[in-house]
Image (tube, grey):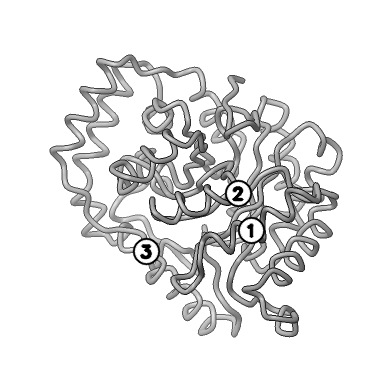
Amino acid sequence: MKKRKLREIEVSAIGMGCMGFSTAYGAIPTEEESIRLIHEAHDLGCTLFDTAEIYATYRNETLVGKALKTFRKDIVLSTKYSPNTLLGQENIPGGKLSRTGVRTALEDSMKRLQTDYIDIYFAHRIPENVDPAELADWFGDLIREGKIRGWGVSEATAEQIRVANSVTPLTAVQSEYSMMARQWEKKVIPVCEELGIGFMAYAPMAGGLLSGKYSASTEYKGDDIRRVISRYKPENVSANQPIIDLIKRFAEEKGCTPAQISLAWVMKNPIVVPIPGMRSDARIKENLGAADIELTDSEYDLLTSKLNKLKVHGERTDEQIAQLGELRTKMYGSSGVHN
């Protein structure tokens, strides 16, 4: 497996997003199967594993902790602090969104993850009313104490990144990035390049759409997050077919799969490390195998120029994802989850 660096932290060129083992994408594997698949990814060279306290409200961290404990020192573990108050966090002195709140959340995450440090600890969104400099100071304390090796922000703006980085240098920014989500290319990714910050790309295949394995007739059931994201509406899936067809043509010419082309495209930038979800042996081998697929400059430029001429229909927003909580409440009487 090839390696990349998120600032000074070396990771496998492709990481594993672990959220889908516990929530958001339909039926989940058993705990035993999930642990087996995480071990398989590690055996094939994956050293970066990502989770968050909000994923299935702590359950995903607990699962990941069980899976990684036998080789914890050999991998890079990232998790995320949510600024929102979650179950059991109502009585934190100063509230969840405070220096004490961050510390309390981290210590609880470490217990669930069965570790005494976190490699990269992310702020899972920066609320509009929060000064990024203050947040950076809180996380900086944790770095100085050795509780975390580095820190990051998710879905942050270029200005927020600059301000935060000036106080405590950021290890990585984690945001959605794929051929269907390119909003960070104009400002955020260039700022990361300038400041030496890594970029972890979640949903690098647009939740599977770019793999070509889904169609307008695909039905999503239960509390599958794709029921509330407009990108998966049948009319938008049909309207985005030209993008899928383009990727398929390039994959055929390159002798690989559409999923691998999608990953190779985001990886053309050396600061980007994709963290796709993968819940089967075939997907793990396919996705991690994309590390060996390299697009030449001319191939990348041609593919990108053709993408630039195609309109992306539908999107994935926090407002849409918030509807998952309403859906879950109707179904189970519990709250939702977002990435």
Q: Is residue 101 left or right of residue 334?
A: right
In the depicted structure, whether residue 192 falls above or below residue 11: below
N-term mark: 3 or 1:
1
Closer mark to the observer between disc 3 and disc 1: 1
In this figure, which residue is indicated by the disc labeled 1? 137
Q: Is residue 174 left or right of residue 279?
A: left
Callout 2 secondary element: loop
Tag 3: amino acid: Thr
Callout 3 secondary element: loop
Q: Give neighbour class at mark 3: few <14, some 14-19, many 20+ (Cα, 10 Å).
A: few
Residue 198 horizontal/vertical position (percent): 52, 37
Q: CA distance from mark 3 to mark 1?
A: 28 Å
In the depicted structure, whether residue 55 falls above or below residue 271: below
Residue 301 horizontal/vertical position (percent): 23, 23
Closer mark to the observer between disc 2 and disc 3: 2
**Dots 3 and 1: beta carbons under 8 Å?**
no
In the depicted structure, whether residue 260 falls above or below residue 199: above
Kindly tell me whether residue 260 is visible in this rendering. no
Residue 85 horizontal/vertical position (percent): 63, 77
Tag 2: amino acid: Thr
Q: CA distance from mark 2 to mark 3?
A: 28 Å
Callout 1 secondary element: helix
Q: CA distance from mark 2 to mark 1?
A: 7 Å
Q: Give neighbour class at mark 1: few <14, some 14-19, many 20+ (Cα, 10 Å).
A: some
In this figure, which residue is indicated by the disc labeled 2? 168
For the point 37% across and 63% down, the residue is 317
Tag 1: amino acid: Asp
Residue 257 horizontal/vertical position (percent): 40, 27
In this figure, which residue is indicated by the disc labeled 3? 317
Q: In front here: 190 or 70?
A: 190
**Dots 2 and 1: beta carbons under 8 Å?**
yes
